[in-house]
């Protein structure tokens, strides 16, 4: 497989992992079980006798990580593109 194809596949995987909390709809999932899904504090959510408040809070809060990861990915993409461009000139 060409290096460019591998890089594009990896970028797509990174984006899917980054935005998975939004794609999964963590808040909607919590509300479907009768729980509140807010980011200001952990709210108890008992499902089947077990408290899932903390996992819902953690997954909901992880939606903010793309704000750090996406710019880093663009910088790495630029560095990679620059190195590919300079290697072709040599």
Image (cartoon, rainbow, N blue to C red):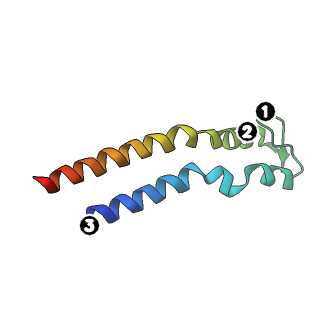
- Marks 3 and 2, the one that precedes in the sequence: 3
- Which one is in front in this view, the residue at disc 3 or the one at disc 2? 3
The residue to which callout 3 is attached is: 2
Question: Which numbered dot is residue 86?
Answer: none
Q: Is residue 79 above or below residue 39?
A: below
Q: Report if the CB atoms under discs 2 and 1 are less than 8 Å apart.
A: yes
Taking the view exactly as shown, the residue that stands out farthest to the right is 34
Where, by quadrant of the figure, is residue 73 drawn? top left
Of 12 and 51, the residue lying toward us: 12
Q: Please identify the quadrant where the N terminus is shown.
A: bottom left
Question: Which numbered dot is residue 57?
Answer: 2
Cα–Cα gap, marks 3 and 1: 46 Å
Residue 55 pos. (x, y %): 70, 41
Q: Residues within 10 Å of mark 3 (few under 14, many from 20)?
A: few
The residue to which callout 1 is attached is: 42
Secondary structure of the residue carrying numbered label 1: loop
Q: Residue at x 30, y 51 (%)?
A: 81
Secondary structure of the residue carrying numbered label 2: helix
């Amino acid at each position: 497989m060409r290096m460019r194809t591998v890089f594009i596949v990896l970028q797509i995987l990174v984006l899917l992992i980054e935005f998975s909390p939004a794609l999964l709809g963590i808040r909607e999932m919590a509300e479907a079980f009768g729980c509140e899904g807010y980011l200001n504090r952990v709210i108890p959510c008992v499902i089947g006798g077990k408290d899932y408040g903390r996992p819902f809070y953690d997954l909901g809060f992880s939606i903010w990580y793309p704000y750090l990861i996406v710019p880093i990915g663009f910088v790495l993409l630029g560095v990679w593109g620059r190195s590919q461009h300079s290697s072709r000139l040599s």
